[in-house]
Amino acid sequence: GTLVSSSPGWEMGAHGRSFTHAVNSVLMKNDDAAGGTIPQLLEKHEFHGSTDGLILMRLARKMMGESFDKEDAASKLDLMMDTMYQFVSECNDDEVRKGIAPLPGAIQTLETLASYDDVAFGLVTGNVEGIARRKMHALGIYDAGALTSL
């Protein structure tokens, strides 16, 4: 099930800011370029429930306007995701936690399930994997003992 919820302000957290950072750094070659937050640039249906890769492509199209080249952006998608991860990995836990929190009961449920020897766990996410793991650490979800770091 879902472990984490977002609240207003999530876009100012490390993960939210990493999107415009990646597009600016990789495609626009200027990390200081104007951008804005995801909710300022995209309609909710263009990012809510979408994978990080799809959000990156939609954000790049919006930020770059007529100069957007879909094939070029797609060929640099892995680099943009690596850039996002690098950005988030350099942020402290408070920045990573900004606007996100474990759902009520999630940590306690994981602690209970971790006490069983015959239960296996996996983390399925649309986030860049390293970012998802970083968020789990910052929120204390790894401390529940059900998930382990690779």
Image (spheres, rainbow, N blue to C red):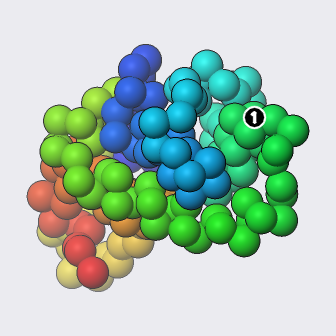
Residue at the disc numbered 1: 62
Viewer-nearest residue: 70 or 138: 70
Displayed quadrant of residue 5: top left
Q: Is residue 96 left or right of residue 8?
A: left
At 61% from the left and 19% from the top, the residue drawn is 40
At 73% from the left and 24% from the top, the residue drawn is 43
Quadrant holding the C terminus: bottom left
- Tell me if I can see residue 52 in this picture: no
The secondary element bearing badge 1 is classed as helix
Displayed quadrant of residue 145: bottom left
Q: Position of residue 69 (x, y in %)?
A: 83, 55
At 38% from the left and 27% from the top, the residue drawn is 12
Viewer-nearest residue: 123 or 62: 62
In this rendering, is residue 126 above or below 92?
below
In this rendering, is residue 138 above or below 79?
above
Viewer-nearest residue: 78 or 113: 78
Q: At label 1, which amino acid type do we have? A: Lys
Viewer-nearest residue: 146 or 89: 89
Q: Is residue 62 left or right of residue 143?
A: right
Q: Is residue 72 left or right of residue 122?
A: right
In this rendering, is residue 54 above or below 148?
above
Q: Position of residue 147 (x, y in %)?
A: 26, 68
- Tell me if I can see residue 95 in this picture: yes
At 70% from the left and 44% from the top, the residue drawn is 60
Q: Position of residue 18 (x, y in %)?
A: 44, 45
Q: Position of residue 120 (x, y in %)?
A: 35, 78
How busy is the neighbourhood of tag 1: few (under 14 within 10 Å), some, or many (20 plus)? some
